[in-house]
Image: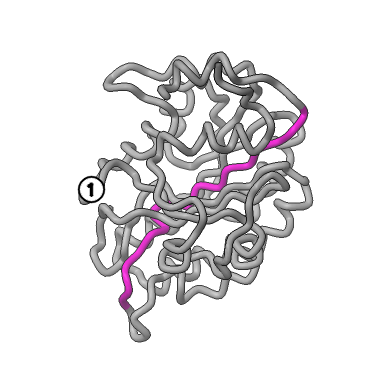
C-alpha cells in the first residue's frame, strides 16, 4: 500500500504517539571491547523498554545504500520523489516535531508538522516534549547529539550522548503516551566518521504491541525482534495502527 492508500484509513482518537529519533545512533562493533556505541552505553531504561516492546531494524533507504543526511527522514514522512507528502498534513492529527537541526525543522514544516526549534540538550528537549505531548496527538523528538559525535569520530562522546538521554526516559514515560517508538534516522558509526548504510534498531512499546524475546536495545539484539527489517516508509503507519488510529482496509 502507498501513503495515499493509507490516508483514508486514518481516524482520530485520544491516544498519544511519541517517536524518539536518535540521530545517527547506529554503529558498528569497534572500540576496545568490539561493541557498538549503543551496546557499550549504560542504557537501563532503553533496555527496560525493549523487554516490553516489539523490536526490529529500520532500513533507511535500501540494502547497501548510504542515505543522504535527510533521506531516511524524508521517506519516514512519506516523500515520493520530489513531492512533499500530502498524507502527513492530511491526517487530521495534531502533530509536532522537536529538533535543533534547521534542515530537519524545514522538512517537518513541509510535511505539515508543527516544527519547534529545541535545544539538543536532553533535559531541555525532554521537558519540551512532555509539555507538547499534552497538546498533540503525535510528538517526534529528534536528538541529534549521537550523530554529531559519530561524525567527529568520538566513540566515547557518542556513548555519553546516548547515556545522557537514557537517564531521562522515565520522565518521558510519565506523560503516558499510548505508543512509544525509539529508532535512529540512519547509522553514523564513530569508527567511520560518516553516515553509513547499516540499518538502525527499532522498538515499539504499546499495549497493542506483541512483545518478543529481545532483552536489550541495540543493533545486534534487535536483529532477532518480531518486526524484522522494515523500511523507513513503513514506520509511521505502524505507529498509527498501534495507537488505534488506522482502520481496516477494504
Residue 178: x percent and y percent?
72, 42
Near-viewer residue (42 or 150)? 42
Side of 231 where 168 appears, left or right = right
Mark 1 = which residue?
66
Region in magenta: 14-30
Q: Is residue 31 magenta?
A: no
Image quarter (top left, top right, bottom left or bottom right) of the C terminus: top right
Query: Visible in this render: residue 35?
Result: yes
Residue 241: x percent and y percent?
61, 33
Query: Visible in this render: residue 106?
Result: no
Which residue is outermost to the front? Answer: 250
Rendered view: 137 above or below 92: below
Residue occupying the point 63% across, 42% down: 18
Say which element carries label 1.
loop
Rendered view: 237 above or below 90: below
Q: Look at the magenta stretch and give its main secondary structure.
A: loop
Residue occupying the point 34% across, 81% down: 34
Near-viewer residue (182 or 245)? 245
Q: Is residue 28 magenta?
A: yes
Amino acid at each position: 500500500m502507498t501513503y495515499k492508500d493509507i490516508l483514508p484509513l486514518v481516524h482520530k482518537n485520544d491516544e498519544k504517539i511519541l517517536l524518539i529519533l536518535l540521530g545517527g545512533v547506529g554503529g558498528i562493533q569497534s572500540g576496545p571491547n568490539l561493541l557498538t556505541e549503543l551496546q557499550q552505553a549504560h542504557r537501563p531504561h532503553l533496555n527496560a523498554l525493549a523487554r516490553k516492546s516489539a523490536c526490529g531494524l529500520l532500513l533507511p533507504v535500501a540494502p547497501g545504500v548510504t542515505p543522504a543526511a535527510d533521506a531516511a527522514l524524508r521517506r519516514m514522512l512519506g516523500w515520493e520523489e520530489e513531492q512533499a507528502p500530502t498524507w502527513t498534513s492530511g491526517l487530521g492529527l495534531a502533530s509536532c516535531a522537536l529538533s535543533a537541526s534547521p534542515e530537519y525543522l524545514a522538512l517537518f514544516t513541509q510535511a505539515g508538522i508543527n516544527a519547534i526549534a529545541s535545544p539538543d540538550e536532553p533535559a531541555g528537549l525532554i521537558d519540551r516534549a512532555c509539555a507538547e505531548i499534552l497538546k498533540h496527538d503525535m510528538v517526534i523528538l529528534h536528538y541529534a547529539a549521537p550523530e554529531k559525535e559519530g561524525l567527529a569520530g568520538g566513540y566515547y562522546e557518542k556513548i555519553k550522548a546516548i547515556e545522557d538521554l537514557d537517564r531521562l526516559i522515565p520522565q518521558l514515560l510519565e506523560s503516558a503516551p499510548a505508543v512509544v517508538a525509539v529508532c535512529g534516522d540512519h547509522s553514523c558509526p564513530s569508527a567511520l566518521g560518516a553516515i553509513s548504510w547499516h540499518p538502525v534498531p527499532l522498538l515499539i512499546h504499546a499495549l497493542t504491541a506483541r512483545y518478543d524475546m529481545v532483552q536489550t536495545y541495540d543493533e545486534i539484539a534487535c536483529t532477532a525482534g518480531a518486526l524484522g527489517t522494515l523500511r523507513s516508509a513503513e514506520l509511521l503507519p505502524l505507529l498509527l495502527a498501534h495507537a488505534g488510529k488506522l482502520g481496516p482496509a477494504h
